[in-house]
Image (spheres, rainbow, N blue to C red):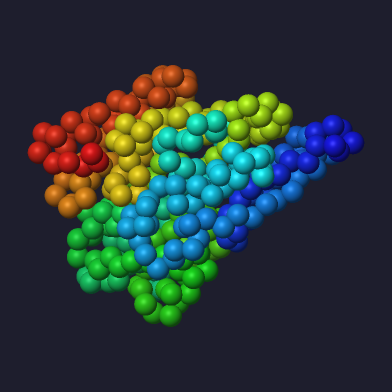
Amino acid sequence: MSRLGYGVLRVGTRGSALARAQTGQVIARLKEQWPGLEVEMVVITTKGDLTLDTPLHQVGGKGLFVKEIEEALLAGEIDLAVHSAKDVPAELPAGLGLVAHPRRADPRDALISREGLALERLPRGARVGSSSLRRVFQLRHLRPDLQVEPLRGNVDTRLRRLEEGRFDAIVLAAAGLGRLGLADRVTEYLDPEVFIPAVGQGALALEARCDDARTRELAAAIDDEETALALAAERAFLAGIEGGCQVPAGAHARLMGDRLVLSGFLASPDGAFFARDRVEGPSGREEAVRLGNALAERLLAAARAQGRSAAR
């Protein structure tokens, strides 16, 4: 036990530079809230870290970056997991729960181009790198003349492939670039109402065992209510469409005064169906979940009306 009686808190994370950076930020926040808390960072390799040459939707989709960490939680090898919220499936294993969401970073996608050109100014036939179905479908919807080609790997690898001339531009999460001190590389931040982010993008999700009251209390001290509301709506949408990495979809929630606004899109895997929609309502956790469910049903209804199977 530590001198304040907290004991050592073992925090699990992936081993990438970005995962370590964001977990370090979480640990710093926890120590600010609980002076004297002893924390050990435990690095865990996930299947997603070992499979870097295949698009995510072809190797299992959601859960690729969290399964092994969740197994360590259930086995009692760690007490708290730090995930990128966009990596966390809509359904969690029995006995685990999301216990806190620190304040969200920038949820937008960012374009980085070799010639400093914005998305609308890229020349016809320009090669744009991304393996996210969500990004690929939106790029093709906005600029059908572009060549969108697969690109995986950590942030440094993706930037290096751009610099080597394999691509004219790539799309990455703005939050990850910011956490790595690489925001100066961004050519253009993409409007989240036009280029809709992934569910949970820019946010972190802290996961613990449901019966671990100590860890839940420690983590709750750094929970951000506005972020939690937004993620409740976005994750309800994800659950409603039964979505994962195999489904081209995205959602972005934000508070506007006392109203919660949720925008989303859904496409069919063959690209024949593509629709956006937006709902809004009072802020509040239950209301946020209802908004997410409502947006999912509206987009699924639009897909059914066209005779398309978008997510199911």
User: What is the quadrant of the C terminus in the image?
Assistant: top left
Q: Confirm whether residue 200 shows in the render.
A: yes
Q: Position of residue 24 (x, y in %)?
A: 68, 51
Q: What residue is shown at x 41% (from left), y 36% (from top)?
A: 90
Question: Between residues 294 and 238, which one lies in front from this camera angle?
Answer: 238
Question: Between residues 17 and 171, which one lies in front from this camera angle?
Answer: 17
Q: Position of residue 229 (x, y in %)?
A: 48, 28
In the picture, measured across the screen, residue 143 lies left or right of residue 236, that is left
Q: What residue is shown at x 66% (from left), y 40% (from top)?
A: 76
Q: What residue is shown at x 35% (from left), y 61% (from top)?
A: 55
Looking at the image, is 180 positioned above or below residue 294?
below
Q: Confirm whether residue 274 shows in the render.
A: no
Looking at the image, is 211 positioned above or below residue 136?
above
Q: Position of residue 57 (x, y in %)?
A: 33, 55
Q: Position of residue 247 (x, y in %)?
A: 29, 46
In the picture, measured across the screen, residue 59 lies left or right of residue 272, that is right
Single out the residue that lies furthest toward the bottom. 164
Question: Between residues 26 and 281, which one lies in front from this camera angle?
Answer: 26
